Amino acid sequence: MEHESPSPTLQGRRVVLAVTGSIAAYKAVNLLRILRGAGASVSVVMTQAATRFIAPLTFEVLSGERVTTDLFEAHEEMKHLSVPAKADAIVVAPATANFLAKAAVGLADDVLSTMVLSARCPLIIAPAMDGEMWSHSTVAEHTAVLRARGAVILDPEVGPLASGQVAQGRLAGEARILGAIQSALVPASDWPDSGC
C-alpha cells in the first residue's frame, strides 16, 4: 500500500475529486479514502461515462456526501457553480483524453467541464489512458495548453495497461497525487516528516 494512514495535512480543506470514464476509475475509491484520511472533506463529481465503470453509491458511502453526476439535476442548487466555489482544489483522477480535450478548448457540456470553467482554485489532473493515446500529438497539445494555464498535470506512469500493452498510461500513484495536492494547498514546512 502506498499510503495506508497519512497525517492529516489537509485538515479543513475541501477537495473536489472528479472521476472520468477510464478503466482506472476504480482507483479513485482508494484515493478518496486517502484524502479523507488526510483530513480533507471530499465532494465527488463523476462524468456519465465514469458511472459505467463504478457506481456513485460507492463514493457516496465513503465521502458521506451525495455525488454530483448531472448538470441538470432540477432539485439541486447550481452545483456547477457552488461546488467549485467552495473548493480548495479540484483533482481529476483519472482524467481521460476526452476530458483533456474539453478542458483545453473550454467545452462545457457536462457538470465537470462546466465546473472546471467556473473554478478559481488549483486544478490537478492525473491522466490515465492507453499508451498510444497518451503519446498522440493532440493529447500532448491539450496537455501543454492546460499546463500553460496553470493546471498541475501528473504524467501517467509506465506499466501494464488494460490493452495488454506495457507503456506510459497508468494513473499516477496515490502518493504522487496526494503530494501534488499538498504542494498546491499546504506550505512544505507544515508537512509531516514522513510525508510524500
Image (cartoon, rainbow, N blue to C red):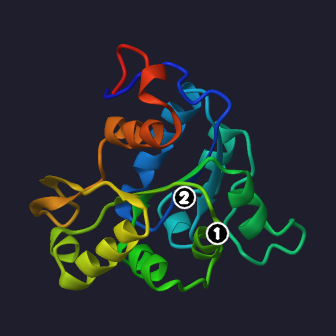
Which residue is disc 1 drawn over? 115
Q: Nearer the viewer, residue 64 or 164?
A: 64
Q: Which mark is residue 23?
A: none
Measure how far apart labels 1 and 2 are at the Cα level. Answer: 10 Å
Q: Nearer the viewer, mark 1 or mark 2?
A: 1
Q: Position of residue 98 (x, y in %)?
A: 40, 79
Q: Is residue 171 left or right of residue 74?
A: left
N-terminal of the two: label 1 or label 2? 2
Instruction: Name the residue rendered at 40%, 74% in the picture.
Output: 100
Q: Secondary structure at mark 2?
A: strand
Q: Quadrant of residue 101?
A: bottom left
The residue type indicated by label 1 comes to: Met
Q: Nearer the viewer, residue 46 or 150?
A: 150
Type of residue at label 2? Ala
Q: Residue at x 18, y 80 (%)?
A: 136
- Residue 6 can be seen in this image: no
Residue 97: x and y, percent?
35, 75
In this rendering, position of residue 163 left or right of residue 75: left
Residue 149: horizontal and vertical position, in percent?
43, 69
| Residue shown at 62% from the left, 79% from the top | 110
Q: Quadrant of residue 189?
A: top left
Indicate whether 196 appears above or below 70.
Answer: above
Q: Secondary structure at mark 1?
A: helix
Residue, disc 2: 18
Residue 21 vs residue 111: left or right? left
